[in-house]
Image: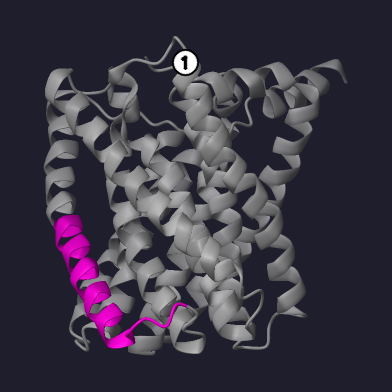
Amino acid sequence: MTQEKIWFNDIIKTMEPRWVMSSMATWAVWMLLFIIWGKLQFVPLKYLAWILAILAILFFILFTIFFTIRIFKFPQDIKNDLSHPITANFFAWIFISASVIVTIIWNVLQPLWWCINPELISNIFYYIWLIIGVLTIVFVPFMLTISEKVDSKHAIWIWFLPPVGLFVLLFAWNFMYINHNIWDWIIYFNSLLFWVAFILYFLVLSMIYARLKFHPLPAPEVAPSFVIWLAPVGVSIIALNTFLGVLKWNNIFNWDLSVVKTLISIVSSMMAWFGIWWFAVTFLILSYYLIKKSLPYTLWWWALVFPVAAFGISFKFLATDLSCQYICIFAAFLGFIAFTLWVVVFYKTLVWIITKKAFQRPKVVK
């Protein structure tokens, strides 16, 4: 009995925000597979997508319960995570995952009539996690600014999570508004968040570039985080294009929509080409790690999945924006890669849990 109690405490104590990455990654792969199924009408993809949906829901509920228990049972560990220059950024995964759920409700569940009262459910998810999300993007930079532990070598790709979280919050609300026109005043608030998200993205981009220029490569344990660079590219394209949909419903600023559409097309194309370039660079970098160093399995491997899936989803919107359906071929290619990565990481995580290595407090990568 005592052994069981210790084992459960170990699970709770090690239930870091990194675990929530598995839920968010699973949601994103599901969404991408569902989009590809809609284009190809390949029936197995549909059933595969729903298996991922069930797993994503279970992951999210389980990790939310465990993480909530951890807040009350081990508050000092939570405080330590919030003050750590790398781990603190993982808290963004929590509200990103919840925002992705809102997106799924309005793009998949509600059109199929598989969600009871989608307005109520999406509002609960959105407004609770909006508060948590905004507090996170204010509180985490504040903690990292006043902390004496922060060094320029800590500027790695996980720092992109706060701006990624903002973009995901933005397009989650955009889908809500397009479907049932709520709270017009939030359009002003979202416009502010757009500027914050983009400026924060380019600020972090400059810091990470400087880190790569003046410091050795990060430890192999965090090498998968190179792929995270694709996440802000993908989610910003989705946020921009869905915001145009909001303006078509309610042009609250009286902007010329043709000009806005042109600007969004230019920025989206620029971000997409940058993403393709970084996708190739990341492949070479991870190959270098595999050949010259190593890639030991940790929860960081889940960072391989969501960015690729989010980047793939963005090409669906880019295809519509540029009126070029051939772009969807690249989305299907990314869907295959994202699903393959998901299978590999899920299997290794399952082995990690069975062997109980997952419940050992991970070594902090310096």
Which residue is denoted by mark 1 in the rendering? Answer: 363
Q: Is residue 63 magenta?
A: no
SS assignment at label 1: loop
Left or right: 160 in relation to 75 = left
Instruction: Answer above or below: position of 57 versus 333.
Output: above
| Image quarter (top left, top right, bottom left or bottom right) of the C terminus | top left
- The reply to whether residue 350 is in sight is no
Instruction: Answer above or below: position of 306 versus 302.
Output: below
Q: At 45% from the left edge and 81% from the top edge, which residue is drawn?
A: 247
- Report the front residue among 149 and 310: 149
Q: Where is residue 66 in the image (x, y as percent from the top left)?
A: 73, 38
Instruction: Answer above or below: position of 198 versus 296.
Output: below
Q: In which quarter of the image is residue 294?
A: top left
Left or right: 323 in relation to 147 = left
- The reply to whether residue 257 is in sight is yes
Q: Where is residue 69 in the image (x, y as percent from the top left)?
A: 78, 33
Q: At 61% from the left edge and 70% from the top edge, which residue is drawn?
A: 185
Q: Decide whether the magenta segment is chiefly helix, strand or loop.
A: helix
Which residues, given as a range, are shown in magenta?
Answer: 253-276
| Residue at the farthest top position | 148
| Image quarter (top left, top right, bottom left or bottom right) of the N terminus | top right
The amino acid at mark 1 is Lys
Q: Where is residue 28 in the image (x, y as percent from the top left)?
A: 46, 62
- Report the front residue among 104 and 286: 104
- Report the front residue among 19 and 190: 190
Left or right: 7 in relation to 86 = right
Report the number of discs. Answer: 1
Q: Quadrant of residue 181?
A: bottom right
Q: At 65% from the left edge and 52% from the top edge, which residue is drawn?
A: 129
